[in-house]
Image (cartoon, grey):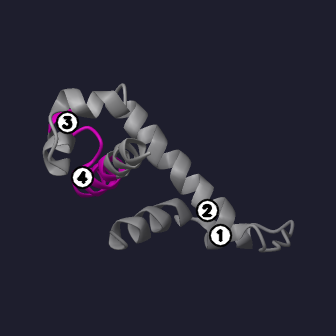
Amino acid sequence: MKQASKKEDTKQRILDEALRLFSQSGYDAVSVERIASAVGIKVPSLYKHFKSKQEIFDAIVAETYRRYDIFTDGIDVHVSESKADEKVFDGISEEMLAKKVDSL
């Protein structure tokens, strides 16, 4: 059980560092080697948790959506026919990502 806990901790550290690096430098500028180095592991160890940089990114997005769903689950939204509501929701994904990075 302790081994599984350590594995999950490493996996979460990979996600946290990848998110920080993607936010700072952009997806294309961040290599798997850079993520592994930030976590303090070797690249082969990173590949035990994720098959690719894209898979890491997909896991970050999935977790962000999961947390967003939990956060917004009890919120009732009344949508009107006007386009006025669009301004409220413009950039919400960017704000969520920025808040996630700030919380690290």
Q: CA distance from mark 3 to mark 2?
A: 27 Å
Asked if residue 56 is positioned above or below residue 16 in the image, the reply reads above
Q: CA distance from mark 3 to mark 1?
A: 31 Å
- Proximity of marks 2 and 1: CB atoms separated by less than 8 Å: yes
Q: Amino acid at mark 3?
A: Ser
Kindly identify the residue that appears in the image at 23 percent across and 32 percent down.
Answer: 45
Which residue is disc 4 drawn over?
21
Kindly identify the residue that appears in the image at 59 percent across and 61 percent down.
Answer: 67
Q: Amino acid at mark 4?
A: Leu
Q: Is residue 53 magenta?
A: no
* Total numbered circles: 4
Q: Amino acid at mark 2?
A: Tyr
Name which of mark 3 and mark 4 comes first in the sequence. Answer: 4
Asked if residue 64 is positioned above or below residue 43 in the image, the reply reads below
How many other residues sit within 10 Å of disc 3, few (<14), some (14-19) or many (≥20)? Answer: some
Q: Amino acid at mark 1?
A: Phe
Percent across and percent down for residue 34 are 15, 41
Name which of mark 3 and mark 2 comes first in the sequence. Answer: 3
Secondary structure of the residue carrying tag 2 is: helix
Q: Is residue 23 magenta?
A: yes
Residues rendered magenta in the picture = 13-33
How many other residues sit within 10 Å of disc 4, few (<14), some (14-19) or many (≥20)? Answer: some
